[in-house]
Image (spheres, rainbow, N blue to C red):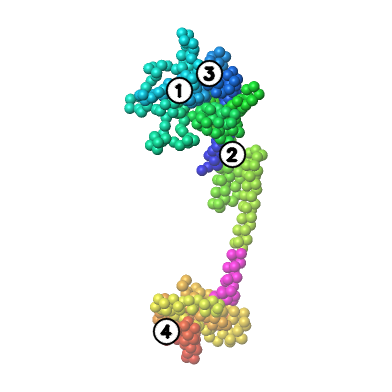
Amino acid sequence: MSLRIKFMLALLSTGLAAAAMVGGLAYVGVTSKVDLIRRQQAAEHFYKYMSAYVGRYGGWQAAIEAESFDRFMQRSIELDGDSAGRVASASVAPLPAGLGRSIGADGRPMPPPARRDGDEPAARPQDMRPAPPDGERRGPADQERRGPPDDERPGPADGERPGPPGGERRDPADGERGGPPDGARRGPPEGERAAARDQRRPDNGRGAAPPFHFVVADQDYKVVLGAGIYRPGEPLPAAAREGARAVVVDGRTALYISSEGVLTPSKQEQQYLNAVREALLAGAAAATVLALLLGVLLSRGLSRTLTRLTDAVRAMHGGSLLQRVPVQGRDEVAALATAFNEMSEQLAHSHAELHASHQTILEQAEQLRELSVRDALTALYNRRHFDEQAITLFNQAVRHQRPLSLVIGDIDFFKRINDQFSHATGDAVLRKVGEILRGHMRLSDLVARYGGEEFVIALPETALPQAAALCDKLRELIEGHPWHEVHPELKVTMSMGVCADIAAGTAEAMLQKADALLYRAKETGRNRVCFA
C-alpha cells in the first residue's frame, strides 16, 4: 500500500472517529437528557396528583373507597389541561381488587370476576357503605360506585373456569393441596394481573406503553400499588426505598412513591431523536468527503517528492551513486531531500576514491603475487611455485589416468661462460634461454627457473615421445640462436632429461628420475636429450 493511500486512510479514519465520538456522545447526551426530563416531569405530576388525592380524602384507604386514583387523575387533568400529567396517568397501574374498585389501564372500571352458580357475590367496599333511604333515587355516581348489576356483569368465557369469590384467582396447586396455609403469599389479584399484562403489551389501551411505572407504599413500606411489579401488601425492597418520595398529609407521612422502568420515547420525541441521528449521519458523511479531498490534495505533493526520492535510491542501488532530487519548500520532506542530495554527492566521491584505491591495491597485490612466484631475472616461475603446481598436475594425471612429462634442463658449461665472458653475459644467456623456452610452451605447460642455470618444464597431457621431440627441438633452437650478438665468441647448448613415468608415485620422484637422466646426458657428451 502506497504512502499516499495510507495518508488518505489516516485522515479518513481520524475524521470518522472524531465524528463518531462527537455524534455518539451528543446522541447519548440528548437521549439521556430527554429521559431525565421526562422522568422528572412525570414523577413531579404523579406526586402532585397523589398528594392531592390522599390529601382530599385524608388517607389512602378512605380515598380508594371514595374514588379510584385513576379516575381522580383523569378528572384533574381534564380540568387543568395538563399534558404532562397524562404521562404520569399512563404510568399508574390499576388498583388491586379488594382495595377499592379495580381500574383498567384505560381508566375505566374493570368488571368484577365471575362467580360460580350458587355462590354469593363477593362483598365490595362500596357495597358496604350505608344504603340511601328508601325511595331516594340513586345518582349515576352511586350506580357507578356499586358497579353494574349482576345480570350485566360479564361471565366467564367459554371453557374458562370461573374465578373464586373476592376477585382473586387461586393457584391450581393451591386447590389441589386444599388451599394455601394461613399467612402464605397469594398471587396478585386478577385485576392487577390483567393490568400487568396490559403494561407488557406494546399498546395498553392508551395508545402507547408507559415509559415507567410508579409503585406506591404506605407509611410502613407495604405496597398498595405494585404497578405489575410487586404484590399488594408485599414489603417494598430496600433498593426501592432509597429513592422513594414521601407523600405528607397534615404533617404526617401517608405514602411513599417509587418510580420504575426506562424511557420509551413518544412519537414526537422519537421524531426529534431521528432528526438528531440523521444530522449526525450527514455530518459523518461530510467529514468523510472532506477527509478524502484533503487526503488527495495533501498527499499529492508529499507523494511526488517521496516518489522522486524512491527512484533516486533505486538508481543508487543500481550503481549510479550521484543523484539529485529537487528541493521544494522548507518542511521535513524538503530537509530530507537536501540531506539525500548531500549524502549522494559524498557517497559518489567516496566511491570514486575507493574504486581508485581498490584498483591500486589489486595491481599491487598482483605484482606482489607475481614477484612471489616468478624469477626476477628470467621472468619465469620460480622453484617454489613449480613444486606446488607440479604436485597438482601429478595428482590430476593419476586421478584421470592421463599422461604427464617432467623435464629438467641445464645449460652446458655455464660456469665457464660466467668466468670467461662475465656474469652480465651469463645473465643475458639465462634471460634468452628463458625466452626461448617460454615462447614454445602451451598455455597449459609450465616452465620455471629451478635454480642457477637449471630449468624445469611440466608438460600435462603429453606422453614421453612427444615430450622428447619437443625437448630436442628446444635444444636445437638454443644451439642455433645467434649468440654472437651477445658476444662474438659465445656459444650456448643445453642438456635435458625427460621422465614420463607417473608410476614413480610422486612428482618429486619423477623429477629425481629426470635429474638422473640429465646427468646421463652430460656424461655422454652434453647437448642432448635423455629419456626413459
Question: Residue 243 or 399: which is nearer the viewer?
Answer: 243
On the question of residue 35 being in view, the answer is no
Q: Distance between the residues labelled 2 and 3?
A: 84 Å
Identify which amino acid the numbered label 1 is placed on.
Ala
Q: Name the residue under label 3.
A: 66
Q: What stretch is highlighted in magenta?
A: 361-381
- Mark 4 vs 3, N-terminal side: 3
The structure residue drawn at horizontal position 59% and vertical position 81%, both measured from the top left corner, is 426
Image quadrant containing the C terminus: bottom left
In magenta stretch: residue 184: no
Secondary structure of residue under mark 3:
helix
Q: Mark 4 points at which residue?
A: 503
Question: Residue 71 or 26: which is nearer the viewer?
Answer: 71
- Mark 2 vs 3, N-terminal side: 3
Q: Distance between the residues labelled 1 and 4?
A: 142 Å
* Position of residue 202 measured from the top left corner of the image (x, y, whole percent): 45, 26
Callout 4: 10 Å neighbours few (<14), some, many (20+)? few
Is there CB contact under 8 Å for labels 2 and 4? no
**Above or below 362: residue 491:** below
Q: Give the label, 2 or 1, closer to the camera.
A: 1
- Mark 2 vs 4, N-terminal side: 2
Q: Residue 302 carries which label?
A: 2
On the question of residue 326 being in view, the answer is yes
The structure residue drawn at horizontal position 52% and vertical position 24%, both measured from the top left corner, is 92
**Above or below 428: residue 521:** below
**Above or below 473: residue 40:** above
Q: How far apart are marks 2 and 4 (CA)?
A: 79 Å
